[in-house]
Amino acid sequence: MTPRVGDRVGFARASRVPLWIHSVSVRIVKEAFLGAAGVRHPRAEQPLAVWVRIVRAAKWARPADLRRAFPDVDPVRVGSGHTVWVFNIRRNEFRLIAAIHFERQRLYTLRFFTHAEYSRN
């Protein structure tokens, strides 16, 4: 198995042979925020739990990897010039906005809206 960008590789001192290869899964920052969103919007609770399971198991090196897991995710450039990602939850009934740092395997939950709230903002 050939290491990819983001893989951590350790080597034996004498042989320089890989001892282990570890591919890091995506870490969700502020995951409790999603639990609170599920409490506020009970219809979103189960779809959010599924979303969390998918993200925790993911190993996204670039946006194309993200799109394989979530084909309808949309990138949006915000006023700061950064890109955030808008996920449709429960068939577009809710919107989850997150910032993703692919190189660090971190996903930061930012906002959770109903579709109507998202449209107003």
Image (spheres, helix red, strand yellow):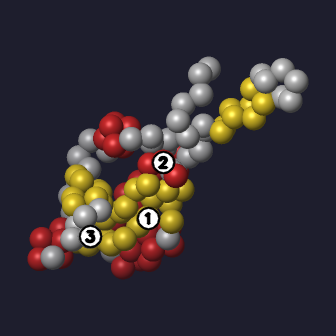
Quarter of the rendering occupied by the N terminus: top right
Work out whether residue 91 or residue 30 is closer to the camera in this orientation and state it: 30
Q: Residue 90, can we see it?
A: no
Q: Residue furthest front?
A: 14
Residue 92: x, y in percent? 20, 58
Check disc 2: other Cα within 10 Å, few if <14, some if 14-19, many if 20+: few
Taking the image as shown, residue 89 lies to the left or right of residue 106, namely left
Q: Amino acid at mark 3?
A: Ser
Pointer 2 residue: 103
N-terminal-most mark, 1 or 3 = 3
Picture residue at 56% right of the left edge, 46% below the top: 25
Q: Amino acid at mark 1?
A: Tyr
Check disc 3: other Cα within 10 Å, few if <14, some if 14-19, many if 20+: few
Q: Residue furthest right?
A: 14
Residue 73: x, y in percent? 26, 50
Pointer 3 residue: 80
3 and 2 marks in contact (CB < 8 Å): no
> Helix, strand or loop at disc 2?
helix
Pointer 1 residue: 108
